Amino acid sequence: MDFLNAIVALANFVIIPAVAYGSQLALGALGVTLIYGILRFSNFAHGDTMAFGTMVTILVTWWLQAQGITLGPLPTALLALPFGILGCMALLLLTDKLVYRFYREQKAKPMILVIVSTGVMFIMNGLVRLIIGPDDQRFADGERFIITAREFKQMTGLQEGLALKTTQGITVVTAVVVVALLFWFLNRTRTGKSMRAYSDNEDLALLSGINPERVVTYTWLIVAALATVAGTLYGLDKSYKPFVYFQLLLPIFASAIVGGLGSPIGAIAGGFVIAFSEVTITYAWKKVLGYLMPDSLAPDGLVQLLSTDYKFAVSFVILLIVLLFRPTGLFGGKSA
Amino acid sequence: MKKLLMASAAMALMAGAASAEEIKIGIILGFTGPIESLTPSMAAGAELAIKEVSDSGLLLDGATVSAVRADSTCIDAGAATAAAERLVTSDGVSGIMGADCSGVTSAILSNVAVPNGVVMISPSATSPALSSADDNGLFFRTAPSDARQGQVMSDILLEEGIKSVAVTYTNNDYGKGLADAFEAAYTAAGGTVTINAAHEDGKADYSAEVGALASAGGDRLVVAGYVDQGGSGIVRAALDSGAFDTFHFPDGMIGAKLEENFGDEIDGSTGQHPGTDSPGIAKFTEMVGDSFDATSPFTPESYDAAALMLMAMQAAGSSDSTVYKTKIMDVANAPGEKIYPGELAKALQIIKDGGDVDYVGATAVELIGAGESAGNYRQIVIEGGKVTTVKYR
């Protein structure tokens, strides 16, 4: 019984939140890694791209809600998601046409493109704040829980409750579907293969007749979809505030670099590594150990490695360790 | 140059010779910055008291009183010091009503008020650190110290039979001061604080923080944060994960937003915030009418701060800070005739006739210790999703 209690407490406070957060980070990191692999620069505007796509989703969600259209127990935002993706695609293609194409034709160095993307970041950031404002926005509706802590306790008779939010369930399911689609696209379709070829060796790809502009356009479209899905899931599960998305840039980049920039599978692994380490290192293990150990050995202190204040430091420490010992990341992407 | 000096000296002499003195009171509040929405009605409250006294013509044989405003910015100690310096040296104020936020208040106190020997009464600085500030007896406040709130919180929880709590606070001077004051009072009275952890405002996700709080355990979670900031995020995450069902909320968490965000999900939670059932506040609200918002936080405290300062001058027979600073405690506390808002003329007359007053004012002022409000708190409980008053203490 105590063992079960320990497992449930751990699942409730560590595993479930970390899996949901990890899925969100993984989707964000996939976008960063695709741009790095194919367009060959670190896109600092990615956090704000997510914010923009989510904003369009939110506006459409509100419109749908006003029309009385809902998805029953599921959040209406899922219905609005395709519109958000379309809006985000339009924005990214426009930025590419207005900004990035110019530098690509000049064969600009990656560092210049990084600075350019920082400029784009500020403009997108301003655009989002101008349209929806800097405040918190709530747009989640439908059933809030798949199972609440109280129901779980009554059902099982355990001391510890286990809560599973609808948004956490949706996050994981959607992430799995999106990642499966992405890998199918990259490995099985002609366009996907040409993207990978372009990423592996640009000159060889050009010689074999791959149209670079087409590859670039497809990359932006996929990135827009990934960013909007990641942003919407994060906003549904937590809350939507433009500044928070800007801050998300750091853990997302940490995930992508830890996994190996340019490696899609690494981005996913990196997302989960960062999410789990942030949560487990700052978790106080007192309760779990209290259940597992005999009473005489039960800890008095909190058994917390680091206070939660240092949550963000954790991703950086991992980032530093990985860069020191495996500069190309866990899954051997391109050197960061 | 000589002529100019002569002229100004003559002017000064003439001014001094005039029978009725003209007294200036500095009002230094954050008219710009994070609490700029509160300060206009605070200043209006102080100016109401000043006008009331000035119009009565009873202060120091018909002295007139006027207010000079200055901007404390609430957060920029340098700018606040410069503004206070201007009030003292160029405007020649006889006392300062302010400042508002605890940080700038201690900066002005040590850099301007103490060196120049000017009395300062703050309506809203609540940091416990100010109680022990080196002030030469010049600093007072009509707001209670958070050390007092920590004590009240501890009393409420122990009376409810809660012996062990987890504490989380917003990571700034207010949150840390309050959480520490509470922990000291609660453990001294036999309670246990299982964890005292900070949270940052403006984050989207508090599951890691709540995970640590839940693991530490406790019968109730004390959230010393802001309702429209991270405080609500913590409560939301704690409810969602089933970590805590009931909470205890200090002043920063109590507001309309709390009912709106959580409704009956937090039934049974308790809290307290500054408040009084004294008849003074009703009189103050009635007197103010529609001219400004009398119920806005710290507005009645501002009225009381200015009124206390002027009555102390009357009691000392002088507008010199070094003289009247000793009289402030006398007029604020018993014995004497109780004085409510709108009765300042009556009070001045009583003092003039040699009587004693006990200023109650809008917030039931009772100065204790080094000259700070004893503090009256409204104890609340959440019932059916509504904040309901239990009692006042």
Image: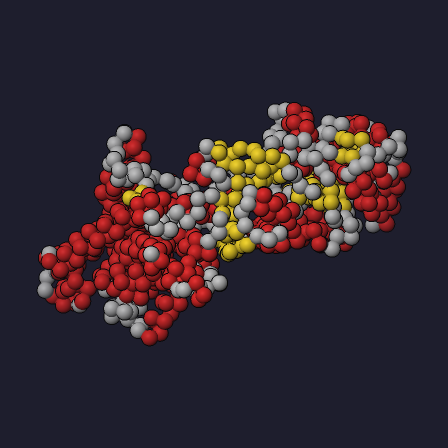
Quarter placement of the N terminus of chain A: bottom left
Left or right: residue A171 versus residue B151 is left
Q: Nearer the viewer, residue A334 or B286?
A: B286
Q: Position of residue B161 (x, y in %)?
A: 55, 45
In which image quadrant can residue B365 be found? top right
Left or right: residue A123 versus residue A263 is right
In which image quadrant can residue A134 be found? top left
Residue B242 visible, this orientation: yes
- The colour style of the image is secondary structure
Residue lying farthest bottom? A325
Residue B88 visible, this orientation: no
The residue at the point 54 percent across, 50 percent down is B163
Left or right: residue B114 versus residue B166 is right
The residue at the point 36 percent across, 71 percent down is A321
Left or right: residue A153 versus residue B73 is left
The residue at the point 55 percent across, 37 percent down is B380
Q: Nearer the viewer, residue A181 or A336?
A: A181
The residue at the point 85 percent across, 47 percent down is B5
Q: Position of residue A243 (x, y in %)?
A: 41, 49
In which image quadrant can residue B319 be found? top right
Q: Position of residue B106 (x, y in %)?
A: 67, 52
Q: Position of residue A128 (x, y in %)?
A: 36, 44
Query: How many numbered circles does the render carry?
Result: 0
Q: B242 above or below B384?
A: below
Quarter placement of the C terminus of chain A: bottom left
